[in-house]
Amino acid sequence: MNDHSLTTIEENQLALLHAQMKPGGTSSPFAKEILLMETHVAGTSRRPMQDIERTLAVGDHLVLRREIEIPHDAYAIAVLTGSGEKLGYLPRDRNEIPARLMDAGKLLFARLESKCWHGDWIQLSARVILRDA
């Protein structure tokens, strides 16, 4: 899988977030969103963000994807746009609990809270949210 595509599971998760539907098609109007943390997106200075940034709006849902194959971070979680563009990662010093929740099958996503250019890199701030149906 490349960084520019979403797996079927991630597409289904994104659909669940937008439509508030449970698996199987039943509605979930009383799903709870639990704020886990507010954080920045790490690694944005290492990617070409000019084109991607234009598509980002405060309030956008962001996809979180576990990346268990990264040897230096057993709890790595990539942060992607809804269309699958990789923005960066949850910071290593804050990702263990969200990673363990995701590994246990919990649905986590992020919501973009702010974006601010600092010279040639962009600072993205997001809220990490657990969707509990």
Image: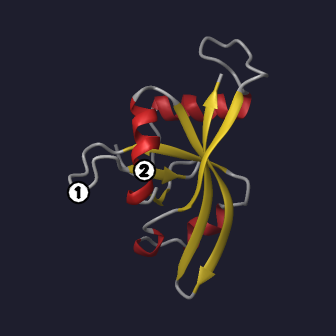
Q: Residue at x 36, y 48 (%)?
A: 2
In screen coordinates, is 71 left or right of 58? left
Q: Residue at x 28, y 53 (%)?
A: 73
In screen coordinates, is 34 left or right of 84? right
Q: Where is the N terminus found, in terms of image quarters? A: top left
Compared to 25, does 52 lie above or below? Answer: below
In the rendered structure, find residue 72 and report the number of the disc placed on it. 1
Locate residue 121, reporting x and y percent.
52, 79
Q: Amino acid at mark 1?
A: His
Q: Where is the C terminus found, in terms of image quarters? A: top right
Q: How many residues crowd around disc 1 within 10 Å: few (fewer than 14), some, or many (20 or more)?
A: few
Residue with the mark numbered 2 = 95
In screen coordinates, is 91 left or right of 18? left
**Disc 2 on helix, strand or loop?**
loop
Q: Amino acid at mark 2?
A: Asn
**Disc 1 on helix, strand or loop?**
loop
Q: Name, please, the residue furthest toward the bottom.
A: 119
Locate residue 26, reporting x and y percent.
70, 12
Query: In which quadrant of the rendered view does residue 30 lie?
Result: top right
Query: Could you tell me how far apart the alpha carbons at marks 2 and 1 are, in whole angstroms?
Result: 13 Å
Dot 2 or dot 1: first in sequence order is 1
